[in-house]
Image (cartoon, rainbow, N blue to C red):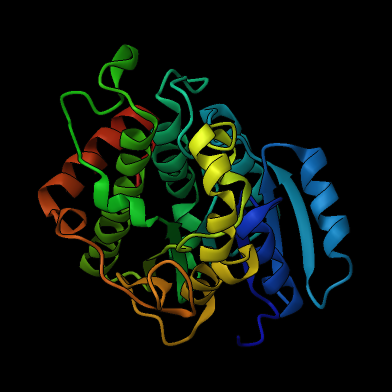
């Protein structure tokens, strides 16, 4: 990792798991890191646990299930900072029961994609004006099971909803958004890049909705053997965020697929569907009210 002194980095969901490890790594290399957390208390506890670093950690509240909270966060950030080198859209929820965000969107897609789309749109002015800035979206191997259905994108009233179907769609949306944002950066000659990453299978609290299930309890010993630590799982997104050799539109993941060290990995054909990406962008602007002035 290069020295990050003078860099300003936002990490959503920075209080635990992959986000926590990313905050720690960036701060140890000298960056000023905004640890964005839905719970201010948990964010402060995470900062205290990390302790003193070469850089600085600033905790700010952010609820990606609430567009008003996203707007408040962005406005407060813009009042305090004149640059944004990296926006690491890390936060996420996985395989939850069906429920809605504060704005009435199905929660997994509402949090994992639409919340981050809205946040990126609110901060795009600063991203554009910061040379060599990056937007990093965290996807998943689960994107391969995702299918876009624009007739029922948000599983209205729970129609056709399954926890994994929704999660897969949200992770596919992360990639469609990344690649479309990169195309728009390039088309408008903006000195910023959009990159994606996935952690393989890592030991974080994302699986908490599975833990009560009988099969998960049975397979837990195997799960621990076949997975990697959160610190290892965070390496692809850390590399995507700060490696000087990263190029826009790349996707980083563990070299063994589920575990290993961060390398460029392929994503499926559906994630490169330009028509779906443009349609998702239009729907996202309509639902979030975010306008990307590129």
Identify the image quadrant of residue 179. Answer: bottom left
Residue shown at 53% from the left, 54% from the top: 90
Q: Is residue 1 above or below residue 238?
A: below
**Viewport quadrant of the N terminus:** bottom right
Residue shown at 39% from the left, 38% from the top: 290
**Viewport quadrant of the C terminus:** bottom left
Residue shown at 72% from the left, 46% from the top: 60
Percent across and percent down for residue 114 are 40, 37
Q: Is residue 135 above or below residue 94?
A: below
Percent across and percent down for residue 59 are 76, 50
Does residue 91 appear in this view?
yes
Percent across and percent down for residue 103 are 47, 20
Q: Residue furthest top?
A: 157
Q: Is residue 177 above or below residue 185?
A: above
Does residue 234 appear in this view?
no
Pick whichever, 14 or 79, lies toward us.
14
Residue 129 placement, left or right of 149: right
Residue 192 placement, left or right of 16: left
């Amino acid at each position: 990792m290069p020295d990050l002194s003078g860099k300003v980095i936002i990490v959503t969901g920075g209080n635990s798991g992959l986000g926590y490890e990313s905050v720690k790594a960036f701060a140890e290399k000298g960056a000023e890191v905004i640890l964005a957390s839905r719970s201010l208390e948990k964010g402060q506890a995470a900062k205290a646990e990390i302790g003193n670093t070469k850089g600085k950690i600033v905790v700010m509240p952010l609820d990606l299930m609430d567009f008003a909270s996203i707007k408040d966060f962005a406005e407060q950030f813009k009042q305090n900072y004149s640059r944004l080198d990296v926006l690491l859209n890390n936060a996420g929820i996985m395989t939850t029961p069906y429920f809605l965000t504060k704005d009435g969107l199905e929660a997994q897609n509402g949090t994992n994609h639409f919340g981050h789309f809205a946040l990126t749109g609110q901060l795009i002015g600063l991203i554009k004006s910061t040379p060599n800035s990056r937007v990093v979206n965290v996807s998943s191997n689960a994107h391969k099971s995702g299918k876009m259905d624009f007739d029922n994108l948000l599983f209205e009233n729970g129609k056709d909803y399954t926890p994994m179907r929704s999660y897969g769609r949200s992770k596919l949306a992360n990639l469609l958004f990344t690649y479309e944002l990169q195309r728009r950066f390039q088309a408008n000659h903006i000195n910023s890049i959009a990159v994606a990453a996935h952690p393989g299978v890592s030991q974080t609290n994302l699986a908490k909705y599975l833990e009560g299930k009988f099969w998960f309890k049975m397979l837990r010993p195997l799960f621990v053997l076949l997975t990697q630590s959160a610190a290892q799982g965070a390496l692809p997104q850390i590399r995507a965020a700060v490696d000087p050799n990263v190029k826009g539109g790349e996707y980083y993941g563990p070299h063994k697929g589920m575990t290993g060290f961060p390398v460029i990995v392929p994503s499926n054909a559906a994630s490169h569907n330009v028509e779906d990406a443009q349609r998702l962008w239009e729907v996202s602007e309509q639902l979030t009210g975010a306008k990307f002035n590129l």
